Amino acid sequence: MPLISRWTAAFVAAVALPGSLACAGDGQFVNVAGHPPVLPAAAPAGAGDPAIERLLTRPADLWERLRQGFALPELDRKLVARHEAWYAARPELLQAIFGRGRRYLHYIIEEVERRGLPTELALLPAVESGFNPMALSSANASGLWQFIPGTGSRYRLAQTAHFDARRDVQASTGAALDYLEELYGMHRDWHLALASYNWGENSVLRAVGQSRARGRDGSFDTLSLPEETRNYVPKLLALRNIVTDPGRFGLNLGELADEPYFTTLPIGFDIDLRVVARLAGLPYEDLLALNPGYNRPQSPGTARPLVVPVESAESTQAAVDQYVVERAGERARQKTPRRGR
């Protein structure tokens, strides 16, 4: 939605006079009829600006924020219900999926909302990879969003001997949302866009053409689809419905604070993730989960920003800075020639 322009915002601010002018006793302010003016109440900061209003009304719980953006239409209720029952019967699986997803969901939701997309898309990695950035399929699809090598290259996800951006959380999320936006622009239908993400846009376009040739409307329900794709969108909608009302399925997702889980540190040089984990006192597995693009713990020639938990950022930066100072002193001592006895 378009934002209010700066000129309009300035006009609103000028009209919304301070509330003190409307206080009793301000009889010196009268209109042409001799009556005290009825002044408009001061507008809250950001009133009329959709972006600011969203911030002012945003819930503290990330699950609730996610629910507020759900917008995908329903589809094949019986098939969706079948997947709801399947997930509900496996609470340990859902706990593992969303346990991994807690690291990434805030970032993904931020990116989805920034583009004005349905927030169900933030749950797509649960279907694709179970929120496992190290997931690798038999078709060599990799990462949270399961990019195959060719599509990854098409969306500028570098794949080198040292680093695979298909596994990088930030890079792959941007690429996946770019791809989904392109697919939606092609079909103007989210069910078909998601089917294309799973099966390929050319395959879905052919299926739509075949549906229309049979006198149908080319919608998702009328297409001849592989079994995986037929179930793909209903799985996402089943997860959407579970998140909407987990109690209805006998589930408890727990609380999830609406705050960033990770941030980046511009280290500026290559460092072994195992060294960082030791310096910062972080479990190596947790650090790897935030930096999954590396093909080995130390990746020469990349010098990418280090991704760390927000709560550990300051102490990690201090530990790395101290490490740099100590290493510099050690190298200086090694270069200093020893004096003879």
Image (cartoon, rainbow, N blue to C red):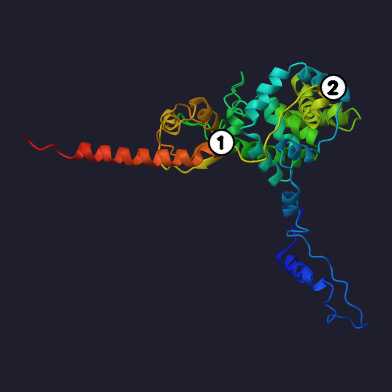
Residue, x 82% and y 71% (percent of image)? 23
Picture quarter containing residue 110?
A: top right
Residue 252 in the image, given as x and y percentages of width and height = 75, 25
Residue, x 63% and y 37% (percent of image)? 173
Q: Mark 1 touching mark 2, by CB under 8 A? A: no
Picture quarter containing residue 318?
A: top left
Picture quarter containing residue 124?
A: top right
> Circle 2 — which element?
helix
Q: Is residue 341 left or right of residue 208?
A: left
- Residue matched to label 2: 81
Please tell me which residue lies in front, 72 or 153: 72
Residue 206 in the image, given as x and y percentages of width and height = 78, 29
Please tell me which residue lies in front, 144 or 336: 336
Amino acid, disc 2: Ala
Residue 198's place in the image compared with 49, above or below, is above
Observer-side mark, 1 or 2, equals 2
- Residue matched to label 1: 157
**Disc assigned to residue 30:** none
Q: Is residue 63 left or right of residue 222?
A: left
Residue 68 in the image, given as x and y percentages of width and height = 78, 40
